[in-house]
Image (tube, rainbow, N blue to C red):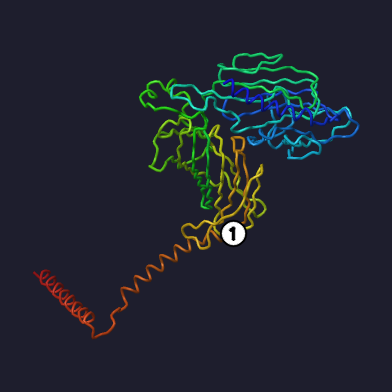
């Protein structure tokens, strides 16, 4: 433990040294107050920062720079800025402030910068307060990396007690929320307090730009570390009234790897002790009018699932065939249908699908998510509107009664977290006459089949009238006629008697 902490602190000190000797000062803006809150209650790290900026220069300023170390950016899944409404309140996504990656001149090479566009430029003496939400995947490191079935899971988190920024900070504070009150160790600085499962640092005053004070927290976390190495969602639209969603999951427990033998008896007898870090179930939040739900793997249907809901929501609880310990994997498929009228709309002659992008699973980190939207055959002028950058391309899928294939819009994104489960839109044009294509094909197919049967029954298929087959058929017809005549005669005699 001591060696690991020393290595981590030594690396952070290297970054601090680089910043100390290579950092310019931005004097026009200052941060009069910074309040940061770090949520470590799940495997997904969420850092919410409330920043109050003031312009002390004479020139108007329309953007604020955010700085992150490069090694931290690789785990950054989502960065969102929004106007501040009050403590504990963040405005909806529609009120979000634009954020873009920038490369300002003269800044340290070890940092990545993002610019937040303010609603209006700040003049001399003006101030503005906004919130920044940074969501990180894989930011928690299991330590020790391997544990037995009876061990609890401990993880390590590294951050800075001081807010890393190119601006001078007058007052700042930091709170770290943990899932349990058991804390193995944590970095103690000036003005450090602990209240149950929360660690508070600060307040600290009059800090220069790029101030950096590394902290390490080693704590217990037996929350599910469910990681989807690859998830493929296929959303198929049928204009006959249904949207079919099929999701394929390749899941792994991303926590501390299990070592030693697994005892099913010990696990069932004392699951909270002999399997505290095991992954037991997942909960999926689905739309309220979902139907035809199924859950299966390569073997077949899995019965360990429960579905309940009301007029506002539907929840699906699924359990794998076996508990997942660290490093264990599983693969399964869930599918469900949705009413078409709840997700497909028309606007100025175009149709558009409005549906959520990410997985409905709670607190699931997805390394690679692929969303396929299968449109009806004959769709054209396809376009996509997503609330965040995604990779996009098109494919073609051949299904029953298809002639040219159905267009498929493919969207791909890495480091997906529950905050990415936002609505996106797929716009396309489709003629109503195209809906008659499949019924006409079915009618024509059955008509052709009946016509072929009638022709076959009435057409003489023999090669020649002198052939043995033709003569045998004549004899059969004669015998059949004689039998029919005798039958009618016998019936008349029976009637007379």
* Residue pictured at 38% horizontal, 24% vertical: 268
| Residue 419 x %, y % | 62, 35
Q: Nearer the viewer, residue 88 or 162?
A: 162
What SS does tag 1 mark?
Answer: loop
Q: Nearer the viewer, residue 186 or 290?
A: 186
| Residue 329 x %, y % | 46, 36
Looking at the image, which residue sits at the far right?
Answer: 58
Q: Quadrant of the C terminus?
A: bottom left
Give the image quarter of residue 320. top left
Horizontally, residue 46 falls left or right of residue 478, namely: right
Give the image quarter of residue 27. top right
Horizontally, residue 278 falls left or right of residue 466, namely: right
* Residue pictured at 40% horizontal, 38% vertical: 302
Q: Quadrant of the N terminus?
A: top right
Task: Identify residue for label 1.
Answer: 431
Horizontally, residue 477 falls left or right of residue 308, namely: left
Horizontally, residue 430 falls left or right of residue 120, namely: left
* Residue pictured at 66% horizontal, 24% vertical: 9
Above or below for 252 versus 159: below
């Amino acid at each position: 433990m001591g060696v690991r902490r020393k290595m981590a602190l030594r690396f952070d000190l290297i970054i601090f040294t680089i910043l100390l000797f290579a950092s310019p000062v931005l004097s026009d803006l200052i941060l009069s107050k910074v309040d940061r809150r770090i949520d470590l209650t799940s495997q997904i790290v969420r850092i919410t920062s409330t920043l109050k900026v003031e312009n002390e220069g004479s020139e108007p300023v329309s953007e604020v720079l955010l700085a992150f170390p490069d090694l931290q950016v690789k785990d950054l899944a989502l960065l969102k800025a929004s106007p501040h409404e009050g403590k504990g309140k963040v405005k909806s996504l529609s009120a979000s402030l634009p954020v873009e990656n920038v490369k300002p001149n003269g800044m340290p090479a070890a940092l990545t910068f993002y610019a937040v566009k303010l609603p209006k430029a700040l003049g001399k003496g003006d101030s503005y307060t906004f919130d920044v939400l940074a969501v990180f995947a894989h930011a928690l490191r299991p330590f020790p990396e391997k544990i037995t079935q009876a061990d609890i899971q401990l993880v390590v988190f590294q951050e800075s007690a001081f807010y890393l920024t190119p601006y001078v900070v007058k007052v700042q504070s930091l709170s770290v929320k943990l899932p349990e009150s058991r804390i193995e160790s944590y970095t103690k600085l000036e003005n450090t307090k602990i209240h149950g499962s929360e660690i508070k640092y600060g307040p600290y005053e009059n800090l220069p730009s790029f101030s950096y004070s590394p902290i390490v927290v080693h704590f217990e976390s037996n929350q599910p570390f469910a990681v989807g190495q690859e998830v493929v969602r296929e959303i198929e639209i049928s204009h006959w009234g249904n949207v079919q969603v099929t999701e394929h999951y390749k899941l792994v427990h991303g926590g501390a790897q299990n070592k030693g033998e697994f005892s099913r008896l010990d696990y069932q007898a004392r699951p909270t002790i002999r399997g505290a870090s095991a992954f037991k179930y997942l909960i999926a939040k689905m739309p309220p009018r979902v139907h035809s739900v199924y859950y299966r793997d390569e073997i077949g249907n899995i019965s360990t699932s429960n579905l309940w809901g009301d007029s506002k929501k539907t929840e699906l609880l699924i359990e794998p065939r076996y508990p997942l310990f660290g490093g264990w994997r599983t693969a399964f498929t869930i599918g469900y249908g949705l009413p078409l009228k709840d997700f497909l709309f028309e606007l100025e002659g175009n149709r558009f699908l409005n549906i959520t992008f990410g997985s409905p699973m709670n607190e699931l980190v997805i390394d690679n998510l692929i969303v396929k939207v299968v449109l009806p055959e004959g769709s054209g002028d396809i376009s996509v509107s997503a609330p965040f950058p995604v990779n996009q391309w098109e494919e073609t899928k051949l299904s029953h009664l298809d002639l040219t294939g159905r267009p498929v819009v493919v969207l791909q994104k890495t480091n997906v977290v529950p905050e990415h489960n936002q609505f996106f839109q797929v716009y396309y044009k489709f003629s109503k006459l195209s809906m008659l294509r499949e019924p006409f094909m079915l009618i024509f197919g059955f008509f052709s089949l009946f016509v072929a049967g009638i022709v076959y029954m009435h057409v003489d298929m023999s090669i020649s009238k002198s052939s043995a087959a033709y003569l045998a058929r004549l004899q059969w017809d004669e015998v059949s006629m004689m039998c029919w005549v005798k039958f009618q005669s016998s019936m008349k005699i029976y009637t007379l008697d």
